[in-house]
Amino acid sequence: MIDEGYIKFEAEWAEEPLGDYPQLPELIQYRQQLFALDWIGAYPDGIGFGNISVKLDQWDHFLISGSTTGNIKELTEAHFSRVFEVDIDANSLKCKGPIIASSESMTHAAVYQGDSSIQAVIHIHNKPAWEAFQFKYPTTAADIPYGTPAMAYAVKQLVKQIGHTGLIIMAGHEEGIIAYGLSLQEAMEQLNTHLL
């Protein structure tokens, strides 16, 4: 069963306009590419999957696609949120923007915390690759579900082992794959190299 699209952390969300960020056009561009590849999207029941983020100047601040945006064909600034505080132990975060942050925000934060040089994170769904690459690439344990502190810590530990560019399979999150790098282009290249 796909366990996706539901926020499991405690979110303190300030609903307000996103503001002007120079990273946003590129973030939207890559999200559209991922949507076209069906790596970000929605299942027939309407539950969305996949998300994308880019780090801002502060190491713990990032822009991320919002919750329930997977089924929207073309995103705008109205579909992103800024995460500015994360507490993995408390399974809580603070965000602001026109929409609440994605249900995978905690995992994105863990990647950024794992290596401060990382600038972009992409979370996709691809069942054939997920099945084929488990334990061939760094993989979280099958009993760790998405959106939990356990998943965040498992991902953070793998990032520390792998370094600033990589691919992680989430065995306990059906179809879930994370790619990350020093730029959105580098994160996307991880996916293109291994999945296409």
Image (cartoon, rainbow, N blue to C red):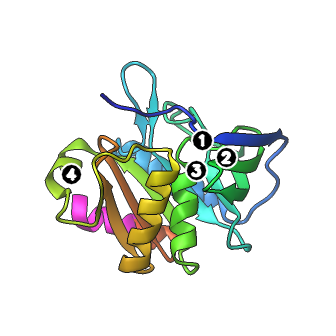
Residue range in magenta is 188-196
Query: Callout 1: 10 Å neighbours few (<14), some, many (20+)?
Result: some
Kind of residue at badge 4: Ala
- Which of these two is toward me, 89 or 53? 89
Q: Residue at x 23, y 66 (%)?
A: 137
Of discs 2 and 4, which sits in the foreground?
4
Q: Which residue is mark 1?
A: 75
Identify the main secondary structure in magenta.
Answer: helix
Q: CA distance from mark 2 to mark 4?
A: 27 Å
Q: Residue at x 77, y 42 (%)?
A: 12
Query: Callout 3: 10 Å neighbours few (<14), some, many (20+)?
Result: many
Disc 2 to disc 1: CB gap under 8 Å: yes
Of labels 1 and 4, earlier in sequence is 1
Of discs 3 and 1, which sits in the foreground?
3
Q: CA distance from mark 1 to mark 4?
A: 26 Å
Drawn side of residue 10 relative to residue 120, left or right: right
The residue tagged with tag 1: helix, strand or loop? Answer: loop
> Which numbered tag is attached to residue 129?
4
Query: Callout 4: 10 Å neighbours few (<14), some, many (20+)?
Result: some
**Residue 21 picture location, percent across and down:** 75, 61
Q: Quadrant of the N terminus?
A: top left
Q: CA distance from mark 4 to mark 3?
A: 22 Å
Of discs 2 and 3, which sits in the foreground?
3
- Which of these two is toward me, 75 or 114? 114
> Which numbered tag is attached to residue 105?
3
Kind of residue at badge 3: Ser
Of labels 2 and 1, earlier in sequence is 1
